[in-house]
Amino acid sequence: FLSIGIPTGLGMLTSLRTLPTINASEQWGGKLSELQTLSKLKGLRIEGLQHVEVQEAKEAKLGMKNNINELFLSWEGHHPTGDDLLENEKMVLEALQPHANLSSLEILCYPAKEFPPWVREMTACGGSTFSNLVWLKID
């Protein structure tokens, strides 16, 4: 997949439906919060999440994007080892909770010791608010 950084002003392209893979470790001037206004996206691939702050992830507002049906989230490279840093990674994933319309989710190289509640709910027996989910990969 082609990978790009997040350009400053990306959020002004409010009719955007597709994006190449976003790599948060690339320094293109923008932050993940640029995704906030992109409500028409159909799918989203984000790599380099170890470089994302919790507030930035919250501002992306993935939970408000009901058109996203495929989501790929990846941490890569050097992983934090301290408990505080690992808790930050968990809070970033918590903040990136997608809308319940999601049909496909892939989480790669997640370094924290436990998942936030929305991911645990997907993998538990019983009901899930993610009733459209047909593909789940956690590696």
Image (tube, rainbow, N blue to C red):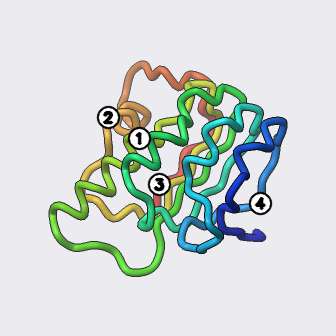
Judge depth for marks 3 and 4 and give the one in front: 4
Of callouts 3 and 4, which one flags the residue occurring earlier in the amino acid sequence?
4
Q: Which three-letter amino acid code belongs to the residue tagged 2?
A: Pro
> In front of the other: label 4 or label 2?
4
- The Cα–Cα distance between marks 4 and 2, rounded to whole angstroms, is 28 Å
Q: Nearer the viewer, residue 88 or 127?
A: 88
The residue indicated by pointer 4 is 20
Which residue matches tag 3?
A: 138
| Image coords of residue 59 (percent x, y) | 49, 40
Residue 10 percent location from the top left of the image: 73, 51
> In 3D space, how far apart are the residues under numbered discs 3 and 1 (Cα atoms)?
17 Å
Q: Nearer the viewer, mark 1 or mark 2?
A: 1
Disc marking residue 117:
2
Amino acid type of the residue tagged 1 in the rendering: Ala
Earlier-in-chain disc, 1 versus 2: 1
Q: Which mark is residue 28?
A: none
Marks 1 and 4 sit apart, C-alpha to C-alpha, by 22 Å
Query: Counting residues from the N terminus, which is met first, the one under dot 3 or under dot 1?
Result: 1
Q: Amino acid at mark 3?
A: Ile
